């Protein structure tokens, strides 16, 4: 259990860019990717704003260099390939390499288009074989050539944080030398209508940690990180972008979809992450919060942060007003954004804020900050089923 | 690292909720190509005010989970890890249909909320007030294996002393139709041979829920120990399954001769079972079968582990699961499973 866990590569695609470079540019210009629905076929085109990846499936296929895959697999493949390239990995087989993906609805973007016809018109006979959650993981792993430890986690909106956590544990236990971890979700009618029935979608741009927040904007995308052991990094003489030093998963055990008022699960997850990282809470320089923009989350998370940080909450912001809430991919996307913050000494602020939340005494970063040294960054992600996860990234 | 099974429960096609039941007088050919579970009294486990809204998989998952914990003497565990390939399909189906039928209007949230893959694990946490680690694996027919690997790692690292780990998948009419029309399910008229002698394509479909309370210490109630689990993503060559088996047994410091019994996950599909049947033929050890009892489903390895544990406990192999009558001591059981000749797995379970 002695090895450190290095991040040696990152890859990302979301509404604010198809790669790291485009993503960083949007973030540093405080430019949102959230807008009108363009590709998703839905009657709600004019009702909600979403963080849609700008390319059609045909265009994504070209970027990914493959044919005949659904949007979920395409997004995942593009981000996973970039992460491997960013890490300089050319030969997968030279080390024990795993692949841990995560998703909430997997190929739903494709299945929902065929489902009614399957039963009513007796068509689309084989689509069940591409619906299962693990299929996009298998497809991506197959194309990039990983077959050592390939699995899929689904814990709602904390999924990708748990993929990072599992990857770090596998490396610490010397089960793998390196592992590609992350998550992917494509927009679907299923999730858009689902969140609409819960009445937690904002019809305008979402306003994380603002008094007048009304709900979230859904998004889509994927991000992957390459994690490697000390020994593996030394062997390949590689640059380490950052370390995964802390992680924690806990359950709020309060309600299937709502967070407890005091954010007990969130508190426990952050506490566990600090313990694994063996640092006191004063060492955290910035928190990339879950901050969905729903009244319930931001209040619950804010109170939990005030509790664990003893009312001296470090600088924090949510970047969901840039990308939208990308569900299973969110924690991986925000892990990549956290790395970009550390590399560039920048804090990307909350957007669309106008008033202080009455539930909180602390306030998020609302104007971009530059030249801030970020040694330790925390990233929170919470999901349905009371699932709460917190990660800590540190400079090497 | 070895871990101990301190309690277990299983809801399956047969009356496995009764501890005294052990497949007496069960025919070796299943009565149907679709094996639904024999349900326990669900209201013993599910709060009365929610039972009407609770889907089939949630009922199976919550009941088996709680049943298992109650056998440990307290409804408490440090962590919960669940494997489910299809997740909450009944609610997914309901929400998908209402989107289609009502053109994305007049929808209600219940089925969407409960369609989330981690609902079983989340509900178990809620009902037992378990604030600990809570993971759900959804990697097709390796979902239970990865849940088990994670649970064992938690125990090894000392992050938990007890873990509730389970596998659950449901077979509901739309799923049956989906599998059937994709050509995966055995035609009723071909269901006339024991699965190990099948000459026809297609599997016997099934469902079930099996949960285990595992710990890093042996207790008075320890029933068996899990020595190791191996999930195999992809087989590149014909002989690779044998190579994986040799490497797996080596890791566990076991020789082939140490294995008393092999539990073979052949599904009754003469095409897709070729490799697994050839493999156990070559292995040449006493071999029993289980998918005529529970049917094929993605987390059937959970059923197999429950069966293997009970075989060790009772020191008896029921005649209904083995072509040649077995007698002798039972020490180590090797489970080998697959789905449609895709992913394979090994689980080794041993007497305490």
Image (tube, coloured by chain):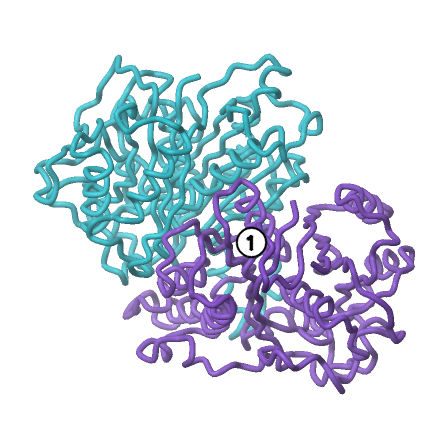
Q: Position of residue B86 (x, y in %)?
A: 54, 62
Comparing B247 with A334, the one in front is: B247
As drawn, A148 above or below B199 = above
As drawn, B272 above or below A313 = below
Rendered image quadrant of residue B120: bottom left
Comparing A319 with B249, the one in front is: B249
Colour given to chain A in the rendered image = cyan
Residue B257 appears in the figure: yes
Within 10 Å of disc 1 (Cα), the crowding (few <14, some 14-19, many 20+) is: many
Query: Circle 1 sits in a helix, a strand or a loop, which is it?
Result: strand
The chain ID associated with circle 1 is: B
- Chain in purple, by letter, is B
Q: Position of residue A103 (x, y in %)?
A: 47, 48
Q: Residue at (45%, 28%) from the top-left corner?
A: A244
Q: Position of residue B330 (x, y in %)?
A: 80, 64
Q: Residue at (34%, 23%) from the top-left corner?
A: A376
How many numbered badges does the structure rendering display?
Answer: 1
Name the residue that disc number 1 marks: B215
The answer to whether residue B182 is left or right of residue B255 is left
């Amino acid at each position: 259990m002695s090895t450190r866990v290095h991040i040696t590569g990152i890859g990302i695609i979301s509404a604010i860019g198809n790669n790291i470079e485009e993503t960083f540019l949007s973030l540093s210009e405080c430019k949102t990717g959230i807008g009108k629905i363009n590709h998703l076929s839905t009657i709600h085109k004019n009702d909600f704003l979403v963080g849609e990846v700008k390319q059609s499936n045909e265009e994504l296929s070209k970027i990914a260099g493959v044919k005949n895959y659904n949007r979920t697999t395409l997004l995942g493949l593009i981000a996973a390939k970039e992460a491997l390239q960013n890490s300089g990995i050319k030969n997968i087989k030279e080390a024990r390499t795993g692949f841990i993906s995560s998703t909430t609805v997997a190929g739903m973007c494709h299945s929902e288009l065929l489902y009614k016809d399957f039963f009513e018109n007796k068509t689309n006979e084989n689509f069940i074989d591409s619906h299962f959650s693990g299929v996009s993981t298998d497809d991506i792993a197959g194309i990039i050539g990983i077959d050592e430890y390939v699995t899929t986690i689904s814990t709602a909106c904390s999924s990708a944080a748990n993929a990072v956590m599992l990857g770090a544990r596998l490396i610490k236990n010397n089960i793998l030398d390196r592992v590609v971890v992350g998550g992917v979700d494509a927009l679907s009618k299923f999730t858009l209508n689902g969140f609409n029935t819960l009445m937690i979608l904002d019809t305008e741009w979402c306003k994380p940690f603002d008094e007048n927040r009304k709900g979230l904007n859904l998004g889509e995308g994927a991000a992957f990180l390459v994690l490697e052991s000390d020994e593996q990094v030394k062997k390949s003489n590689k640059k380490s972008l950052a370390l995964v030093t802390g992680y924690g998963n806990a359950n709020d055990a309060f309600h299937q979809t709502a967070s407890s008022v005091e954010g007990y699960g969130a508190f426990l997850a952050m506490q566990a992450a600090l313990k694994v990282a063996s640092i006191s809470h004063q060492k955290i320089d910035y928190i990339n919060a879950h901050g969905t923009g729903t009244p319930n989350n931001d209040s619950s998370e804010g109170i939990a942060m005030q509790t664990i940080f003893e009312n001296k909450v470090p600088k924090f912001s949510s970047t969901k007003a840039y990308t939208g809430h990308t569900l299973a991919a969110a924690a991986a996307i925000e892990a990549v954004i956290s790395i970009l913050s550390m590399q560039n000494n920048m804090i990307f602020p909350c957007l669309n804020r106008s008033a202080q939340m009455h539930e909180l005494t602390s306030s998020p970063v609302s104007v971009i900050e530059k030249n801030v040294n970020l040694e330790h960054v925390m990233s929170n992600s919470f999901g349905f089923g009371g699932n709460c996860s917190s990660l800590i990234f540190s400079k090497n | 690292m070895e871990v101990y099974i301190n309690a277990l429960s299983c809801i399956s096609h047969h009356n496995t909720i009764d501890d005294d039941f052990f497949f007496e007088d069960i025919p070796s050919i299943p009565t149907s190509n679709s094996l639904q579970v024999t349900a326990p009294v669900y209201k013993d486990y599910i709060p009365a005010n929610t039972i009407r809204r609770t889907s089939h998989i949630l009922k199976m998952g919550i009941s088996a989970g709680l049943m298992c914990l109650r056998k440990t003497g307290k409804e408490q565990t440090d962590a919960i890890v669940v494997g489910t390939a299809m997740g909450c399909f009944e609610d997914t189906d309901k929400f998908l249909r209402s989107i289609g039928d009502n053109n994305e209007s007049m929808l209600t949230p219940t089925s969407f909320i409960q369609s989330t893959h981690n609902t079983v694990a989340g509900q178990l946490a809620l009902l037992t007030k378990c604030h600990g680690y809570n993971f759900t694996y959804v990697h097709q027919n390796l979902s239970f294996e990865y849940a088990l690997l994670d649970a064992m790692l938690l125990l090894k690292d000392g992050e938990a002393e007890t873990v509730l780990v389970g596998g659950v998948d449901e077979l509901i009419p739309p799923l049956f139709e989906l599998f059937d029309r994709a050509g995966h399910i055995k035609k009723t008229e071909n269901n006339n041979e024991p699965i190990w002698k099948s000459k026809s394509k297609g599997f016997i479909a099934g469902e079930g829920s099996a949960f285990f309370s595992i710990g890093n210490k042996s207790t008075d109630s320890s029933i068996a120990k899990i020595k190791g689990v191996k999930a195999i993503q992809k087989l590149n060559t014909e002989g690779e399954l044998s190579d994986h088996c040799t490497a797996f047994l080596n890791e566990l410091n076991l020789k082939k001769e140490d294995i008393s019994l092999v539990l073979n996950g052949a599904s009754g599909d003469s095409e897709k079972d070729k490799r697994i049947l050839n493999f156990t033929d070559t292995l040449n050890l006493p071999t029993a079968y289980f998918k005529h009892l529970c049917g094929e489903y993605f987390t059937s390895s959970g059923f197999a582990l429950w069966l293997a544990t009970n075989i060790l406990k009772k020191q008896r192999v029921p005649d209904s699961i083995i072509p040649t009558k077995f007698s002798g001591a039972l020490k180590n059981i090797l489970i080998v499973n697959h789905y449609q000749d895709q992913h394979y797995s090994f689980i080794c379970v041993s007497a305490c």
